[in-house]
Image (spheres, helix red, strand yellow):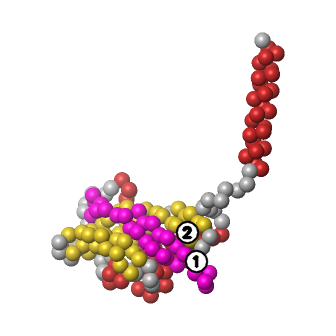
């Protein structure tokens, strides 16, 4: 019985060593990359874009997405609706607006990249003139242009009204 146990242990060890060798020698997968200098460049652009939005800097935001399509939640007298717009003109024009992005996860393949992060967007309601805080996720598709600069191809902000609004006394667990 001891002989069979040693033989099984030797067979298992050989199989494990072979599996590790095969894994180490396997070609690199051809899928999107999540590390490297291009990924860090996109992540840096994501952060800089968030800072430009937070500063409501029309010139800086236009440098990121002068011709990009943005899906965002807007509000008019009838209530909230999804709007497709070119650029961030209405967001930048709203004196009560604020945008913050979280840490960006980035996937890259060739001259296209996708960054996604948590985000919060504060906008002034045209109906109530109160600030409305919306939280959710922002997904940005980036394209490296001929000048080697990453620019926004399209952006989607999937946000919904937060339970805690600016000026409320209570704070959420997320803000603590």
Question: Is any part of residue 102 visible from this angle?
Answer: no
Residue 40, position as x, y percentages in the image: 60, 69
Disc 2 packing (10 Å; few <14; some 14–19; many ≥20): many
Residue 172, position as x, y percentages in the image: 33, 55
Task: Indicate whether 50 appears above or below 134.
Answer: below
The stretch in magenta equals 137-166
Quarter occupied by the C terminus: bottom left
According to the picture, the residue beneath numbered tag 2 turns out to be 113
Per the image, label 1 sits on a secondary structure element best described as: strand
Looking at the rendering, which quadrant does residue 6 occupy?
A: top right
Q: Earlier in the sequence, mark 2 or mark 1?
A: 2
Classify residue 129 as left or right of residue 25. left
Residue 92, position as x, y percentages in the image: 36, 81
Classify residue 47 as left or right of residue 20. left
Q: Name the residue at 73% across, 54% down.
A: 27
Disc 1 packing (10 Å; few <14; some 14–19; many ≥20): some
Quarter occupied by the N terminus: top right
According to the picture, the residue beneath numbered tag 1 turns out to be 144
Looking at the rendering, which quadrant does residue 74 occupy?
A: bottom left
Contact flag, marks 2 and 1 (Cβ < 8 Å) = yes
Q: CA distance from mark 2 to mark 1?
A: 8 Å
Q: Name the residue at 67% across, 56% down.
A: 29
């Amino acid at each position: 019985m001891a002989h069979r146990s040693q033989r099984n242990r030797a067979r298992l060890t050989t199989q494990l060593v072979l599996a590790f060798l095969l894994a180490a020698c396997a070609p690199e997968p051809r899928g999107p990359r999540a590390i490297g200098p291009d990924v860090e460049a996109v992540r840096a652009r994501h952060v800089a874009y968030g800072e430009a939005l937070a500063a409501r800097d029309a010139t800086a935001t236009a440098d990121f997405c002068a011709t990009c399509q943005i899906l965002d939640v807007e509000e008019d007298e009838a209530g909230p609706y999804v709007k497709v717009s070119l650029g961030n003109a209405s967001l930048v024009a709203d004196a009560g607006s604020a945008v913050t992005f979280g840490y960006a996860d980035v996937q890259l393949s060739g001259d296209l990249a996708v960054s996604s992060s948590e985000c919060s967007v504060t906008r002034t309601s045209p109906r109530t003139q109160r600030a409305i805080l919306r939280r959710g996720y922002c997904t940005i598709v980036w394209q490296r242009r001929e000048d080697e600069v990453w620019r926004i191809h399209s952006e989607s902000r999937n946000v919904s009204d937060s339970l805690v609004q600016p000026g409320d006394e209570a704070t959420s667990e997320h803000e603590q």
